[in-house]
Amino acid sequence: MVTGAASGIGRALAQELARRGAELALVDVSEAALAETASSIAATGRRVTTHVVDVADAARMEALAEAVVAAHGRVELLVNNAGVSVTGTLEEQSLDDWRWIVGVNFWGVVHGCKFFLPHLRKNGEAHIVNLSSTFGIVGMPTQSSYSATKFAVRGLSEALWAELRGSGIGVTSVHPGAVKTNIVRASRTADPSAKQQMAVRFDRVAMAPEKVARKILRAVERDKLRVVIGPEAHAADWAKRLFPAGVHGILAYGYRRFAASGARSEP
């Protein structure tokens, strides 16, 4: 079961899993794009169902778990991938922005874990994949809400990993750097005119989602608690380890320079 499966990492994971012989239950709020993902998987001969659900909606997610099990008989791999972003300083981001991003990025993961875990337990062996971010390792200027949700996903995953250790259910927290997805173009921002420029810069350095999908599944096969993906993600991880406070001074200096030139950070 993959959330956020209409594009980006979610679509790439679904397609890679289909190539490996999996049946798929795909979830997203974008019905048309979700149908495109499903069509590409159906062409491989694998069984696929689609579910148009907002992961922030607890009642819909609880019903989804029952619907997926009814359709497929079991769930062995849960991928909580759905995510959104908001770019802007804390003062620029509205409380509605915060409610929206927390609902999708954090509550969506909580709902997935909470409602699917009883079904995962029935298999003897199963795995949960939760998508965090480089910004779940280091808090970034203009990304306070995004970083907050991705740190929360990391903390949830680490706690859940410990609770489930020895149960046959693994948990992997994923921390990718720049990936070619729609998250920047679909983000909310205080400066809409800069969004397209930001997306172009992002795409120049971003990794293909297909490569990210393969790395995630390799981490699942190895039952890893955490996987860091991409050079910028590894750099942020080591900088935080070596200079846990100092790295934020560097970020603050960089942010002042970027803000002066009108540039923005992006997830």
Image (cartoon, rainbow, N blue to C red):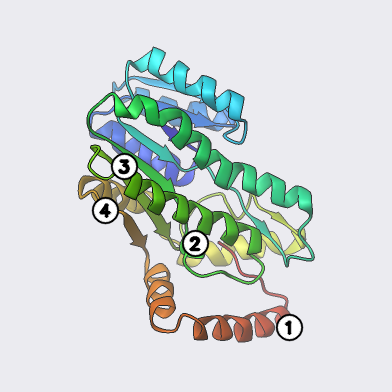
**Viewer-closest of 154 and 260:** 154
Task: Give me the residue at 63% from left, 64% from top.
Answer: 143
**Mark 4 vs mark 2, CA separation in Å:** 17 Å
Q: Earlier in the sequence, mark 1 or mark 2?
A: 2
Please give the label number shown on residue 228: none
> Residue tagged by mark 4?
224
The answer to whether marks 4 and 2 mark residues whose Cβ atoms lie closer than 8 Å is no
The answer to whether marks 1 and 2 mark residues whose Cβ atoms lie closer than 8 Å is no
Closest to the camera, between mark 3 and mark 2, is 3
Residue 44: give x, y in percent of width and height.
Answer: 29, 26
The answer to whether marks 3 and 2 mark residues whose Cβ atoms lie closer than 8 Å is no
Q: Amino acid at mark 4?
A: Lys
Residue 254: give x, y in percent of width and height.
Answer: 60, 83
Q: Identify the image quadrant of residue 16.
A: top left
> Residue tagged by mark 1?
260
Q: Secondary structure at mark 4?
A: loop
> Residue tagged by mark 2?
136
Q: Is residue 149 above or below residue 73?
A: below
> Residue tagged by mark 3?
164
